[in-house]
Image (cartoon, rainbow, N blue to C red):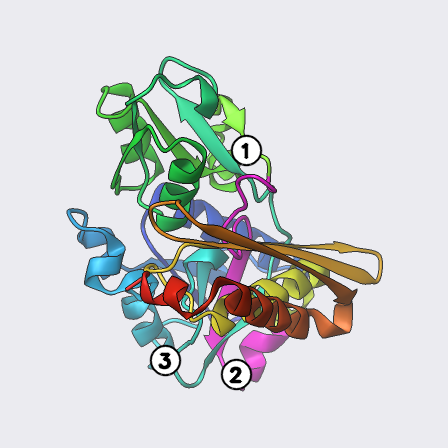
């Protein structure tokens, strides 16, 4: 019986806390642990504190993990719970993404204030999004719209929408479902026309490499189809050097012993996009992602990536 308190590090938003509690519940279920055996430690991150600028200008995705990873590395916490799509491609030395919980619906959700769909928005309407990928996809489908940077947690963005700061916004459907807010969605986007971010909808746990105690507790929680899909998506992202400066989308799906992948890269203004697909055995998941990245990079040409900077 585990007696030493296990410390889970997390951001303090309602969604981050919901994800940490879900992880705690699964640990309790699998190991007969009590709630008092698992402490949730809220850690303030730079990404949460800096709200007035786009992430790409101040350091990218790593701003949501830096302080958490510092406490994980020095042993103040035992594991960290994250949204997979927020994780940088390369992690600090000594840390790894040890497991993935079963993925929720990966689609993006459109939330309109007075219309139900993206196509129904009037010309010149204002859409808010902090994601370069979503901004590029919106501009690709509706170049007539005004797209603005729109930072804040889920509740903040929904409040800004209700207050009329924008006419519509996009959020991850998975996060809304985890918060019990699925009813606010007015349109669910098709994953081919509006592909999600790599990792979207999946919770991951970061831990110290070689921590046998934590590894043994986490192992039963891993959902193999999700971890296989994420191996492909993160390999695609890594081969393209993905960050918050790069509009990259990608989704891998597992069916039986086969994996299928669809990816897209875009210019930030949505004026140019390149799609790529791949398929193969589950054991080749990472290679399928890397191969797709190489093919789409060759197809787009060197100028495409220069224009990102």
Q: Position of residue 242 (x, y in %)?
A: 42, 66
Above/below status of 137 relative to 88:
above
Q: Within 10 Å of the Cα at label 2, are there few (<14), some (14-19), or many (20+) other Cα atoms?
A: few
Q: Position of residue 85 (x, y in %)?
A: 46, 56
Q: Residue furthest top?
A: 114
Depth order, front residue of 156/308: 308
Asked if labels 2 and 3 touch by Cβ distance under 8 angstroms, the answer is no
Q: CA distance from mark 3 to mark 2?
A: 11 Å
Residue corresponding to mark 2: 211
Question: Which quadrant is home to the C terminus?
Answer: bottom left
Q: Position of residue 110 (x, y in %)?
A: 45, 29
Depth order, front residue of 57/121: 121
Whether 198 is among the magenta residues is yes
Residue corresponding to mark 1: 189
Q: Residue 270 occupies which quadrant of the picture?
A: top left
- Mark 3 lies on a secondary structure that is helix
Q: CA distance from mark 1 to mark 2?
A: 40 Å
Whether 200 is among the magenta residues is yes
Asked whether residue 274 is in view, the answer is: yes
Name the front one of labels 1 and 2: 1
Q: Within 10 Å of the Cα at label 1, are there few (<14), some (14-19), or many (20+) other Cα atoms?
A: some
Residue 73's tag is 3
Q: Residue at x 46, y 53 (%)?
A: 20
Comes first in the chain, label 1 or label 3? 3
Q: Residue 98 occupies which quadrant of the picture?
A: bottom right
Q: Specify whether 50 is left or right of 133.
A: left
Which range of residues does the magenta coloring cover?
A: 191-216
Above/below status of 158 relative to 33:
above
- Mark 2 lies on a secondary structure that is loop
Comes first in the chain, label 3 or label 2? 3
Q: Specify whether 261 is left or right of 16.
A: right
């Amino acid at each position: 019986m585990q007696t030493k308190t296990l410390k889970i590090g997390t951001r303090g938003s309602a969604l981050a806390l919901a994800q940490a509690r879900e992880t705690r519940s699964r640990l309790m279920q699998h190991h007969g642990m009590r709630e008092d055996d698992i402490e949730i430690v809220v850690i303030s991150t730079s990404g949460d504190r800096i709200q007035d600028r786009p992430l790409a200008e101040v350091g990218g995705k790593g701003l949501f993990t830096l302080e958490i990873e510092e406490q994980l590395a020095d042993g103040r916490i035992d594991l960290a719970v994250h949204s997979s799509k927020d994780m940088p491609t390369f992690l600090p030395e000594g840390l790894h993404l040890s497991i993935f919980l079963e993925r929720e619906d990966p689609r993006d959700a459109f939330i309109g204030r007075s219309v139900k769909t993206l196509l129904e928005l009037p010309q010149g309407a204002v859409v808010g999004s902090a994601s370069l990928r979503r901004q590029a996809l919106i501009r690709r489908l509706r170049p007539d719209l005004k797209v603005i940077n729109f930072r804040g947690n889920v509740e903040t963005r929904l409040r800004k929408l209700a207050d009329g700061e924008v006419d519509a916004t996009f959020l991850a459907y998975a996060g809304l479902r985890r918060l019990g807010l699925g009813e606010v969605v007015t349109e669910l986007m098709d994953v081919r026309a509006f592909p999600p971010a790599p990792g979207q909808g999946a919770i991951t746990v970061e831990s110290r490499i070689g921590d046998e105690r934590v590894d043994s507790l986490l192992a039963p929680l891993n959902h193999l189809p999700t971890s296989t899909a994420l191996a492909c998506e993160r390999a695609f992202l890594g081969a393209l050097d993905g960050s918050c400066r790069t509009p990259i989308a990608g989704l891998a799906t597992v069916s039986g012993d086969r994996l299928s992948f669809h990816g897209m890269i875009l210019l930030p203004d949505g004026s140019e996009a390149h799609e790529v697909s791949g398929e193969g055995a589950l054991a080749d998941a990472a290679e399928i992602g890397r191969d797709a990245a190489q093919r789409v990079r060759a197809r787009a040409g060197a100028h495409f990536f220069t224009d990102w900077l």
